[in-house]
Image (cartoon, rainbow, N blue to C red):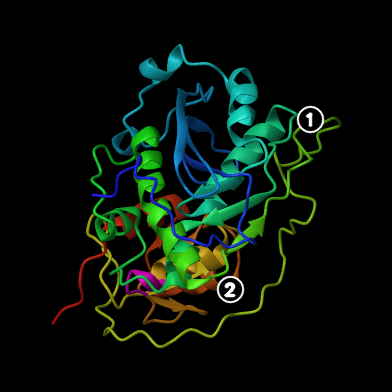
Amino acid sequence: MTMLDDRTTAAPWPTAYPKQGYAVVDVETTGLARDDRIVSAAVYRLDAQGNVEDHWYTLVNPERDPGPVWIHGLTSDVLEGAPLFPEIAAEFSARLDGRVLVAHNAMFDWSMIAREYARAERTAPVRQRLCTIALSKELGLPLSNFRLESLATHFGVVQRQAHNALDDARVLAEAFRPSLHTAAERGVRLPLLECRPLTEWASPSSGGSPAPRIGQQASYRANGWRPSRKRPACTYPNPGRYEADKPLKQGMRVAFSGDTSIDRELLEDRAVEAGLHVATSVSRLTSLLVTNDPDAATSKTVKAKSFGTPIVDEAAFTQLLRDVAPADE
């Protein structure tokens, strides 16, 4: 097993790597949409070479229903006496301050954290993030998929309580350290991305006009155009349409429509990694349409309804991605 207190380091250490250390983060939330809230958060602080300095965990009262209790296990009763995010923001900031934020699917964790800070009219003190999915790809790790449990298994890390923020952060810290050292030994450039703080938050509307989205980035465009990406052909046969209460199956054709809280390209990458076929349009062969606004009169939703194609929202689809059934042999 990879031990957190094993401080053997490779030499020489790349001078271009961050010197201020890392904050390995995991947050559990009420859902995946832009208006969802954090219900628990954990941070493992690591030094520049990935050695653990300390860790911290807190529950957070989301001031709403806790969402998927069957995933994170945090009920309304448990969260009722927890601090509000503004009450833990200062301590959270102390853990993040000046460090590179590390998370598995870092776009999602950063987005949720940034929105909570925006609601509190504060700014998270972090300027760079590193996604361990992206790092795993850079290293070419022989993983069957890019789930956290697969990364943990590769490095011999034992998961004790999945979807518990503290344990997920521990597992990621243990898996990140050998990943970081492998990258250093190979001279791999770390896939660091900028963390742009959110500077807009909701305020009471007047005259019946709708309030702005909480934590909306100034660059966000509701109907922004995004060029399609060329992807390799799916190697699995199309098993047909998705059926409710059954798992997705490798080879299913999945289309997306409208805005998503998780970066669209990352969501599509996760679908491809699970063995699904990401389609750019809806046809009679489409297995499933994913949209957060099924009532929108987009060409994809109109076609899906006319063909009888099943439609699910992003939150449901993300849960389905956890257990995709293998293709028929």
Under circle 2, the secondary element is: helix
Task: Give coordinates of residue 28: x percent, y percent.
Answer: 44, 37
Q: Do the residues under discs 1 and 2 have CB atoms within 8 angstroms? A: no
Task: Give coordinates of residue 160: x percent, y percent.
Answer: 23, 38
Residue 203: give its label: 1
In the picture provided, is 194 more to the left or to the right than 285?
A: right
- Residue drawn at the location 80% of the way across and 51% of the way down: 218
- Residue drawn at the location 76% of the way across and 40% of the way down: 212
In the picture provided, is 156 more to the left or to the right than 81?
A: left
Camera-nearest residue between 18 and 139: 18
Q: Is residue 158 magenta?
A: no
What residue span does the magenta drawing correspond to? 272-276
In the picture provided, is 305 more to the left or to the right than 97?
A: left
Residue that extends furthest to the right in the rendered view of this protein? 207
Viewer-side label of 1, 2: 1
Position of residue 317 relative to residue 57, above or below, is below
Q: Amino acid at mark 1?
A: Ser
Residue 12 appears in view? yes
Q: Is residue 274 magenta?
A: yes
Task: Give coordinates of residue 281: x percent, y percent.
Answer: 51, 79
Alpha carbon distance from label 1 to label 2? 33 Å
Residue that extends furthest to the top in the rendered view of this protein? 81
- Residue drawn at the location 54% of the way across and 22% of the way down: 63
Position of residue 69 relative to residue 75, above or below, is below
Question: Which residue is denoted by mark 2 in the rendering?
Answer: 299
Under circle 1, the secondary element is: loop
Q: Is most of the magenta stretch helix, strand or loop?
A: loop
User: Quadrant of residue 227 in the image?
Assistant: bottom right
Position of residue 307 relative to residue 270, above or below, is below
Residue 241: give its label: none
Task: Give coordinates of residue 36: x percent, y percent.
Answer: 54, 38
